[in-house]
Image: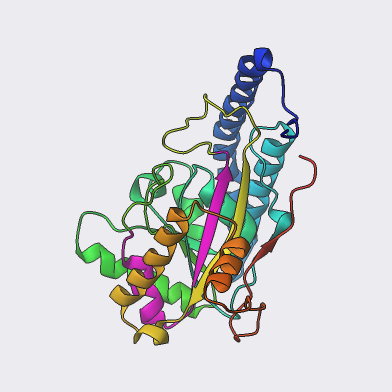
Amino acid sequence: MAAPTSRQPRLLDPLWRFLRALRAAFTVLLYAIVAPSGLLPYVLFRLCFRGTPEQRARILQRTSARGVRIMHWWLRTFRVIHFDWRQVRLELPAGPCVIVANHPTQLDPTVMMAVLGEACTIVKPSVYNRLFVHHILAGAWHFEGPSLDPMSVGHVVENAVERLRCGMHLFVFPEAKRSPQGRLREFGRIAFEIACRANVPLVSIAIRCEPCYLSRETPMFLPPAQLPRVFVEVLAVDRPQEVGADSRALKQRVEGRYRQWVADGMPPVALQSAALSAADGRQPTSPGASGLPARSSMRPPTGT
């Protein structure tokens, strides 16, 4: 006989879902009210701090990371969605690198900001040019993504390479938009071109949300019956030299790995690695044994 699962009675499911949707809507409303108020501290910061543009950018990135960590604390406290950045252990290469990730939920950019602390990213033009946020994004050395003009792609690559040469991490969602549930969009090539041009490692991050929430098919006002939890792990680390610094070959390798992971049901990375090793008759590779950064580990969530 299957062990009974601890969940709310079925008659109360609609009520619990309604309350969670209400809390989520309140959180979004609060964020919409508070976010523009970040412009005033930014103006005061620019007037008072006389450091270099890079120093100002790093401080703004750390400040933004603290802000989104507070937001995720709020979401955990009110049981809207569970993500605790303190439980994520990402072992990244020493020095700058390009970080790519799948994009299953609406919160993925804030998840990456909370985990990385200091990193810049490519922001789509419709968001980058919004009132109140444009100057803050530019001050933190985030930059506008490519527009319909083909020449803009080269400009984005040059900006990204410049950031990497300053020692910063760059994270990109190669799908550009949220993934359909259980599938992936076609990857763009810009992140892989940047990694090859700058000759830096490319780290693939796997993001899972169980059960699925805030995807394109699961809007905010339709929360699942169970509390959604977000998990973040390192899927692999690739170096441009391994494919002859060919951005097309690098894209094909990384995208193929992601698609295989999704086809396998998006399992935890450690379990997938052990299963592949067992199928090949090999012992699972211990972290750091190959000289590459160890795969990430994430302790099981405790509490809410």
Q: For the image shown, how many numbered marks are present on the structure?
A: 0
Specify whether residue 173 is painted magenta: no
Quadrant in the picture for the C terminus? top right
Of 200 and 213, nearer the camera is 213
Quadrant in the picture for the N terminus? top right
- The answer, for residue 116, to whether it is visible in the render is no
The part of the chain drawn in magenta is: 187-211
Of 281 and 48, nearer the camera is 281
Query: Which residue occupies the extreme right position in the image?
Result: 303
Which quarter of the picture shows residue 272? bottom right
Of 138 and 70, nearer the camera is 70
Task: Give the residue drawn at x 57%, y 45%.
Answer: 209
Reply above or below: 49 against 239: above
Reply above or below: 20 against 90: above
**Left or right of residue 216, residue 292 in this image:** right
- The answer, for residue 174, to whether it is visible in the render is yes
Question: Residue 96 at x, y = what percent?
Answer: 53, 77
**Colour mode?**
rainbow
Question: Residue 295 at x, y = what percent?
Answer: 62, 70
Task: Give the residue drawn at x 62%, y 52%.
Answer: 231
Reply above or below: 198 against 235: below
Of 29 and 133, nearer the camera is 29
Reply above or below: 48 against 29: below
Which quarter of the picture shows residue 240? bottom left
Question: Residue 145 at x, y = what percent?
Answer: 35, 57
**Left or right of residue 28, residue 258 in this image:** left
Query: Which residue occupies the extreme top position in the image?
Result: 11
Question: Residue 200 at x, y = what percent?
Answer: 46, 80
Specify whether residue 203 is painted magenta: yes
Task: Give the residue drawn at x 72%, y 22%.
Answer: 8
